[in-house]
């Protein structure tokens, strides 16, 4: 009988999903067959449920009034989604559900079947990712109550980076912090794992060599891949570190936080709001965190062009750090919303990476081609769309095998 896997990616107010058909001969490494994908947005306020099939045909597009919010905010959407999946699947059997979970802490270094004990252990990691972990776990908790028989798998954003050497995981703090788990973890691992697998198939030279993968979306980070394994990354203990992002600051002198606390009298929650939601492109430009808006305004608004300049400058600095960790560079891969679509930002970054051997093919870049470097570029530059849901499907199949 044909089976299916549901991949879920829950944010604080949205639940994205993808449904995959699993044929009897499929293995975790087989190409994925997407039946449908979509999202429930506006959870807790005005939910909007949209789904399309693999050809882009709209399967559902509905809004409804939210029930009460709070910790149970995901029960409603999860039940709605499962009901729709049940109707939509017809005779196809759901074999398992995979969840993107932001933080696996020091112990969860591979995907794991979710049990009540695992859920409790993952909840205990909330202090490491207070804004993201509860949202990642809510759908799993809701589904465990609704369908205790259905196998569920947690797939971690941190796990791909467990191959980083100890020196890249360390922070120069008193040893007691590392003992409490306060160290560098890295994130976007499901995306990096997908890209590492693509490179193995499409670009064996890069897969076997030294590559920087740039996941540049509303959140952004770089991963230093050596022979397909993460040896360093720009996000660290939290998703605040490294690159400048849409609304997050990226790398920041910790002295600034002390200034906010001591001189401005801000509380921890206010500092958190500034660093996560009011900084980055939005904070500096004062108008938007969306690259499309910013490009449209850059010529007339000096604050916008300063924000774009810093975005590129910080990327190039962090890329230099990753190249140092790799001791050289063979490839650079752009992925996620900005990485896949923004030829202007890619061109500005590549111009500043010429010292590393990057030569951009401008026509290929403008066309969003897969290879955007010239044939004499010593660093091959690619654009590869990411697919975190396909990594989740793979993890579910591995766990249930
Ligand atoms: P997330 O999944 O984290 O929400 P995405 O990877 O979808 O983020 O990236 C979202 C960002 O990508 C948007 O905020 C926008 O800045 C950028 N983006 C999307 N499409 C384009 C485009 N065509 N040109 C430039 N930037 C784009």
Image (cartoon, rainbow, N blue to C red):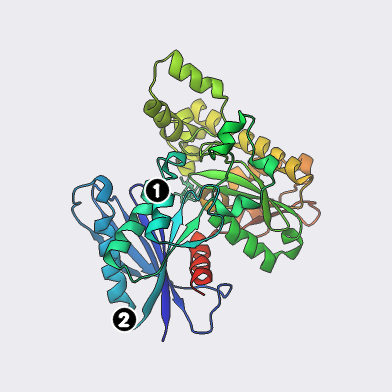
Label 1, ligand 1: CB separation under 8 Å: no
Q: Position of residue 282 (x, y in %)?
A: 45, 33
Image coordinates for residue 220, horizontal then vertical, percent: 54, 44
| Residue in front for this viewpoint, 379 or 45 | 45
Ligand 1 is within 8 Å of the C-beta of the residue at disc 2: no
Asked which quadrant contains residue 190, the reply is: bottom right
Closest to the camera, between mark 1 and mark 2, is 1
The circle drawn on residue 214 is none
238 or 330: nearer the viewer? 238
Residue ID at (45%, 42%): 129
Q: Residue at x 52, y 75 (%)?
A: 401
* Sequence-first tag of 1 and 2: 2
Quadrant where the image shows the N terminus: bottom left
Residue named by callout 2: 90
Secondary structure found at label 2: loop
Q: Is residue 42 left or right of residue 206?
A: left
């Amino acid at each position: 009988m044909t089976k299916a896997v549901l991949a879920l990616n829950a944010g604080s107010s949205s639940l994205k999903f993808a449904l995959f058909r699993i044929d009897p001969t499929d293995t975790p490494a087989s190409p994925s067959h997407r039946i449908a994908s979509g999202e429930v947005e506006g959870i807790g306020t005005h939910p909007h449920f949209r789904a399309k099939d693999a050809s882009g045909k709209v399967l559902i597009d509905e809004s409804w009034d939210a029930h009460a919010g709070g910790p149970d905010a995901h029960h409603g959407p999860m039940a709605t989604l499962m009901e729709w999946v049940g109707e939509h699947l017809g005779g196809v059997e759901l074999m398992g559900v995979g969840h993107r979970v932001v933080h696996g802490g020091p112990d969860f270094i591979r995907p794991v079947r979710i049990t009540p004990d695992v859920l409790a252990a993952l909840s205990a990691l909330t202090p490491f990712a207070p804004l993201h972990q509860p949202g990642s776990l809510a759908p799993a908790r809701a589904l465990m109550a609704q369908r205790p028989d259905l196998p569920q798998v947690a797939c971690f954003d941190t796990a791909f980076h467990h191959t980083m050497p100890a020196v890249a995981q360390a922070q120069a703090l008193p040893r007691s912090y590392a003992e409490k788990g306060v160290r560098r973890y890295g994130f976007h691992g499901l995306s990096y794992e997908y890209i590492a697998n693509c490179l193995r198939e499409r670009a064996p030279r890069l897969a076997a060599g030294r590559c920087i993968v740039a996941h540049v979306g509303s959140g952004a980070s770089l991963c230093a891949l050596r022979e397909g394994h993460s040896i360093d990354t720009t996000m660290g203990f939290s998703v605040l570190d490294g690159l400048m992002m849409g609304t997050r600051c990226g790398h920041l002198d910790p002295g600034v936080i002390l200034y906010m606390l001591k001189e401005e009298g801000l509380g921890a929650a206010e500092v958190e709001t500034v660093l996560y939601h009011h900084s980055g492109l939005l904070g500096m430009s004062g108008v938007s965190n969306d690259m499309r808006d910013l490009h449209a305004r850059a010529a007339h608004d000096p604050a916008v062009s300063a924000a774009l300049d810093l975005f590129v400058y910080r990327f190039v600095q962090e890329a230099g750090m990753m190249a140092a960790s790799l001791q050289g560079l063979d490839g650079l891969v752009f992925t996620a919303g900005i990485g896949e679509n923004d030829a202007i930002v890619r061109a500005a970054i590549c111009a500043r990476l010429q010292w590393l051997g990057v030569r951009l093919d401008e026509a290929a870049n403008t066309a969003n081609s897969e290879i955007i470097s010239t044939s004499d570029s010593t660093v091959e530059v690619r654009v590869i769309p990411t697919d975190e849901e396909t990594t989740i499907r793979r993890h579910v199949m591995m766990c249930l095998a």
